[in-house]
Image (cartoon, rainbow, N blue to C red):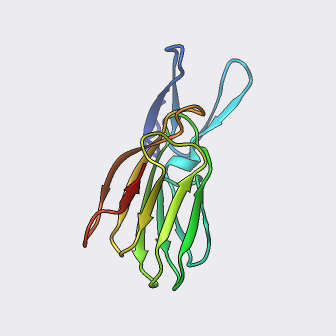
Amino acid sequence: MADATYTPKVYRKQGGDEFVVASGGTFTLESGATFTDERFSASVAVAADVLAIPVTARYVAKTTGADAEALTLANGVPGQRLNIALVTDGGGTGTLTPATCSGFATIVFADAGDIADLEYVDDTVGWILVGTAGVVAPPVITV
């Protein structure tokens, strides 16, 4: 395809078969299943006191409220990357607990500028922590 309006991305199934999905597009597998790539190219803002971190965007800009927030993160799809940034510190901390994860249990977002980069491996391993950064200090990670 010579259409310059999209950037192709290659996804590999566990068996090693390759297929290409256009950014924001849809690809139908031989089995008839449909794979949509929209979740990997968007960004979303999450307001204070909203506790569910969406898995429908690549980048999440979170604002915390004045009180502590128990943030949740559902399982993603294999290969999915998610960058969560605390953009506005309302005074409270946001403690993220994914449904399934390996190598960590929680990530505590305390200061504006705290960032965590996650990747979803599969439904057994879940989310893994690729990296963190912060302006004051990186987010606190518990295991």
125, 27: nearer the viewer: 125
**Residue 137 visible within the image:** yes
In the image, residue 41 lies at what x, y percent? 49, 51
Write down the quadrant of residue 71 in the picture.
Answer: bottom right
Q: What residue appears at the point 39 percent right and 73 percent down from the top-left corner?
A: 110
In the image, residue 32 lies at what x, y percent? 74, 23
Residue furthest out toward the right: 32
70 in relation to 116, above or below: below
Write down the quadrant of residue 119 in the picture.
Answer: top left
In the image, residue 134 lies at what x, y percent? 28, 66
**Residue 43 visible within the image:** no
Q: What residue appears at the point 50 percent right and 34 percent down from the top-left corner?
A: 121
28, 134: nearer the viewer: 134
Q: What residue appears at the point 51 percent right and 38 percent down from the top-left corner?
A: 22
Q: What residue appears at the point 61 percent right and 48 percent down from the top-left corner?
A: 99
In the image, residue 34 lies at what x, y percent? 69, 32
